[in-house]
Amino acid sequence: MRLGVLILLLASSLAFSQNLEQAKKAYQAQNYKTATEILQAVVTKDPQDLEAQFLLGLADMRLEQWDLAVLQFRKVIELDADHLPAYLQLGLIYEKKKDIPRAQEAWKKVLDLAKDEKTKHFAQKHLGNLKP
């Protein structure tokens, strides 16, 4: 009986991994709607999957679903409070939505977390361009 359960768990894990790979392929092929559909299933099954949550946010951005993308990136940050790419994407979205206070907050967090000068410069440039 234990072997059967183990085999079932392994098969489920393999299918789950294949779904994430399918979502990545759909995203890379610019099939963002398909990617979001697959990723929704992945994150429903495993809400702790940081990679799937982040990729879902990126796909939502490509579909210009700004509010959904914000929710996804917030979920990523709940899972990893120092997830630099999520803060960077939030900065871009909040700028797009003209939500200056939240954009400033996101860019400041990028500055706090960034280790390389290129990213720091990018964030500083965006911060400097924000006009209330």
Image (cartoon, rainbow, N blue to C red):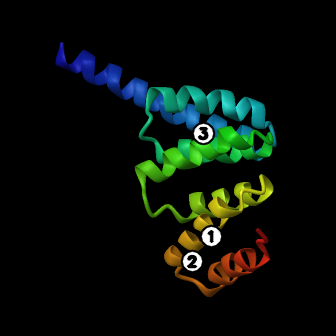
Label 3 sits on a secondary structure element that is: helix
Compare residues 116 and 16 and report the one nearer the observer.
116
Q: Are marks 1 and 3 in contact (CB under 8 Å)?
A: no
Where in the figure is residue 110, as x and y percent of width and height?
57, 71
Q: Which mark is residue 107?
A: 1
Q: Mark 2 or mark 3, which has the lower sequence index?
A: 3
Q: Quadrant of residue 14?
A: top left
Q: CA distance from mark 1 to mark 3?
A: 31 Å
Residue 4, compared with residue 27, is above or below; it is: above
Compare residues 66 and 97 and report the one nearer the observer.
97
Residue at 60% in and 64% down: 106
Which of the two marks, 1 or 3, is nearer to us in this view?
A: 1
Which of the two marks, 2 or 3, is nearer to us in this view?
A: 2
Where in the figure is residue 32, as x and y percent of width and height?
77, 37
Residue 27, compared with residue 112, is above or below; it is: above
Q: CA distance from mark 2 to mark 3?
A: 32 Å
Where in the figure is residue 89, as x and y percent of width and height?
66, 58
Residue at 69% in and 40% down: 67
